[in-house]
Image (cartoon, rainbow, N blue to C red):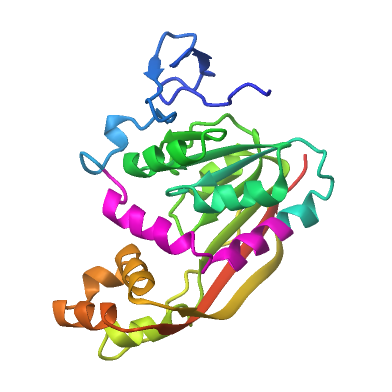
């Protein structure tokens, strides 16, 4: 088994694990939680006492995602990774930056197999607790995507699904020839839900990623399909895992959650880049 790659968030030296403790050469020490994750988020990187998504939102997300409504996105990501790294025997290191409760990382593992070392980071301690408990063979750390606790040029594939991140950190941790996939909502994503929430719904605003120095643009992916949420539980889970929940009035929340089913447009875009070789 390859050694774990975490680096110290204070001095950036490698962290070595002994039992349930990670320690660097400068004697900075970080204990592994009982669920299996390690907290590498420095206090001065926190914007609140307990940043990130809370347990209720994460549980709704897990309930929704495990029903497979977004499985085509995970399949598209894994297919693209295999196109760039076609040899299943090749050892790879994959990071899901802002991985939430671990759904996409696990889906990638199911498809890509055991020759990949899987890492997940998220600023939410609740997310890392859930992910590490559910997927104990993977490595999880509470950490900011603006200060990734991995060494320079240590990652073959970096996946980012919706989460904010630092482009400078992405290029720093990727190896030459490394692959970067950023998935985000496209214009028509969940438009039918937006119609239920807003009086004058608009298409989803799409962020444009500027060119990154040292990164080669590859053909982008479009993942667009129709999905039917078959019951009130799945509609409620979707509503609670999105920012729309906080935008909706109590009346509109109640209306959404009383619908017997909901037909939706699922519309993702995936930017694909490859780090230039030296």
- Give coordinates of residue 25: x percent, y percent: 49, 9
**Quick one: 63 or 244, which is closer to the camera?**
63
Q: Is residue 74 magenta?
A: yes
Does any portion of residue 213 appear in the rendered image?
no
Residue under the image location 57 percent in, 48 percent down: 106
Does any portion of residue 51 appear in the rendered image?
yes
Name above or below for residue 64 compared with residue 87: below
Residue under the image location 22 percent in, 69 percent down: 246
Quadrant location of residue 192? bottom left
Residue under the image location 28 percent in, 81 percent down: 256
Our reading of the magenta stretch's main secondary structure is helix
Residue under the image location 35 percent in, 74 percent down: 235
Q: Quadrant of the C terminus?
A: top right
Q: Quadrant of the N terminus?
A: top right
| Start-end of magenta stretch | 51-79
- Give coordinates of residue 208: x percent, y percent: 51, 69
- Name the residue at the bottom extreme: 200
Quadrant location of residue 177? top right
Count all numbered tags in the image, as a single digit.
Answer: 0
- Give coordinates of residue 131: x percent, y percent: 45, 42
- Name the residue at the left extreme: 250
- Give coordinates of residue 38: x percent, y percent: 41, 28
Q: Is residue 39 magenta?
A: no
Name above or below for residue 66 compared with residue 72: above
Quadrant location of residue 75? bottom right
**Quick one: 142 or 231, which is closer to the camera?**
231
């Amino acid at each position: 088994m390859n050694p774990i790659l975490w680096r110290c968030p204070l001095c950036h030296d490698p962290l070595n694990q002994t039992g349930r403790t990670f320690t660097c050469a400068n004697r900075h020490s970080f204990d592994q939680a009982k669920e299996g994750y390690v907290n590498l988020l420095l206090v001065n990187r926190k914007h609140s006492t307990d940043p990130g998504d809370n347990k209720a939102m994460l549980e709704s997300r897990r309930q929704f995602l495990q029903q497979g409504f977004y499985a085509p996105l995970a399949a598209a990501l894994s297919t693209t990774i295999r196109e760039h790294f076609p040899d299943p025997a090749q050892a790879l290191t994959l990071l899901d930056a802002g991985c939430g409760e671990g759904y996409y990382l696990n889906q990638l593992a199911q498809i890509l197999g055991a020759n990949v070392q899987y890492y997940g980071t998220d600023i939410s301690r609740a997310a890392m607790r859930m992910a590490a408990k559910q997927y104990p063979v993977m490595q999880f750390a509470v950490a900011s995507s603006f200060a990734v606790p991995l060494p320079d040029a240590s990652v073959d594939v970096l996946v980012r699904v919706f989460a904010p991140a630092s482009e400078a950190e992405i290029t720093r941790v990727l190896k030459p020839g490394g692959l970067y996939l950023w998935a985000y909502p496209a214009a028509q994503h969940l438009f039918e839900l937006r119609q239920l929430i807003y009086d004058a719904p608009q298409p989803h605003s799409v962020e444009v990623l500027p060119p990154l120095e040292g990164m080669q643009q590859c053909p982008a992916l479009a993942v667009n399909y129709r999905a039917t949420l078959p019951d009130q539980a799945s509609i409620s889970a979707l509503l609670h895992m999105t920012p729309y929940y906080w935008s909706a009035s109590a009346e509109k929340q109640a209306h959404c959650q009383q619908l017997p089913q909901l037909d939706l447009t699922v519309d993702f875009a995936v930017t694909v880049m490859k780090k230039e070789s030296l």
